Amino acid sequence: MESLIRRNAHASTASRGVAASVFASVLFGAIGLLGGHLDGLTPEQTTAWRVLFIAAALGALHATGPRRAALVTVSRRIIRRPRLIAVVLLNTAIMAVQLWVFMWGPANGDTQDIAFGYFLLPLVMVVVGRLFFRDRLRMLQWAAVAAAAVGVLAQALIAGGVGWPVLIIAGLYPVYFALRRWAGIDSMQVFLIEILLLVIPSAVIAVSHLVSPADAAASWPPLLLMATLSAAAMILYILASRLLPLSLFGLLSYLEPVLVLGASLLLGETLAVADAFVYGPIVAALVLLGLSGRRRPREHLEEPPL
């Protein structure tokens, strides 16, 4: 009976993690689309406003009750351990870069590079999960990885290499999530601490825009909507990373670049015939992953001790 209860609890946790990941991906796709309509703002300014809204949303969630107590507890734990301070500072820098490059792409007509980075990211996360956290994948999940790898390889051959935005996304995000789990600080409270560390520089950048509001008056409605969606998306994304094994979390992330790619097309970017060799295998990977998700998950990430 206890075994059945544990399996049901694991299945419920995985289902909530999958739902959080899917909703986060949908919101990120919408953010990518909105990012192309902020003509009066620089990527740095839009990133700053995203940070401020995320901080406000998370701060409201932790204002009272158990979440506030958890924030105090984890803050004390980090302060007492220099190694944890170093991890938090490094991850704060990584998160700042990720938030910025996500807005830089739409503003500079490179949304497809951003999408490719997120296509490559899950493969890297699968490798990290397998090598460092002993994640185990089912046959259909391995098939999804293989299909996605074909698409990523095709994209690299067609593009003649890999751009720096791709390397930033696919190279740094796995480090971010792996460090959180390795250090045992994979929680929403730690993410709030990281965001709070970015509030002051973000406020300075955001206020610098206010000196000439007429230049970007038309951008305020999409800016406010984008910032609000950012807060919800990041909360869901971090929640999914906590509820799912790192490999499964990485594979589910394939929905995000598909939606970001759709946003790039709506923003006027185009696809060539050769791109069918890229996105065909990616769609196949998503189908295989969906079929795999219908089966009850049996393996879960074991958190390594500090």
Image: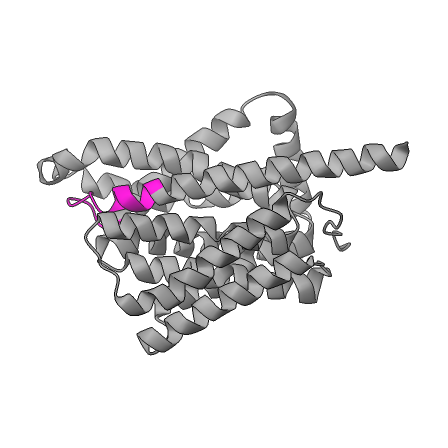
Name the residue rendered at 74%, 39% in the picture.
10
Q: Nearer the viewer, residue 194 or 159?
A: 159
50 displayed left or right of 304: left
211 displayed left or right of 258: left
Q: Is residue 71 among what the camera can see?
A: yes
Name the residue rendered at 47%, 64% in the picture.
120
User: x, y (%) of residue 17?
Assistant: 60, 39
Q: Quadrant of residue 116?
A: bottom left
Q: Give the quarter of the figure containing the N terminus.
A: top right
With respect to residue 44, does 71 lie above or below?
A: above
Magenta stretch: give its range. Answer: 30-44
Name the residue rendered at 89%, 33% in the picture.
2
181 displayed left or right of 29: right
Query: Farthest residue in the top direction?
Result: 65
User: x, y (%) of residue 95?
Assistant: 46, 52
User: x, y (%) of residue 228?
Assistant: 36, 32
Q: Give the quarter of the figure containing the C terminus.
A: bottom right
With respect to residue 245, does 54 lie above or below?
A: above
Query: Farthest residue in the left direction?
Result: 214
How many marks the image carries: the answer is 0
Q: Is residue 179 among what the camera can see?
A: no
User: x, y (%) of residue 5?
Assistant: 83, 32
Q: Nearer the viewer, residue 73 or 288?
A: 288
On whether residue 140 falls in the magenta region, the answer is no
Q: Nearer the viewer, residue 275 or 122?
A: 275
Q: Nearer the viewer, residue 139 or 269?
A: 139
Q: Quadrant of residue 156?
A: bottom left
Q: How is the image coloured?
A: one colour
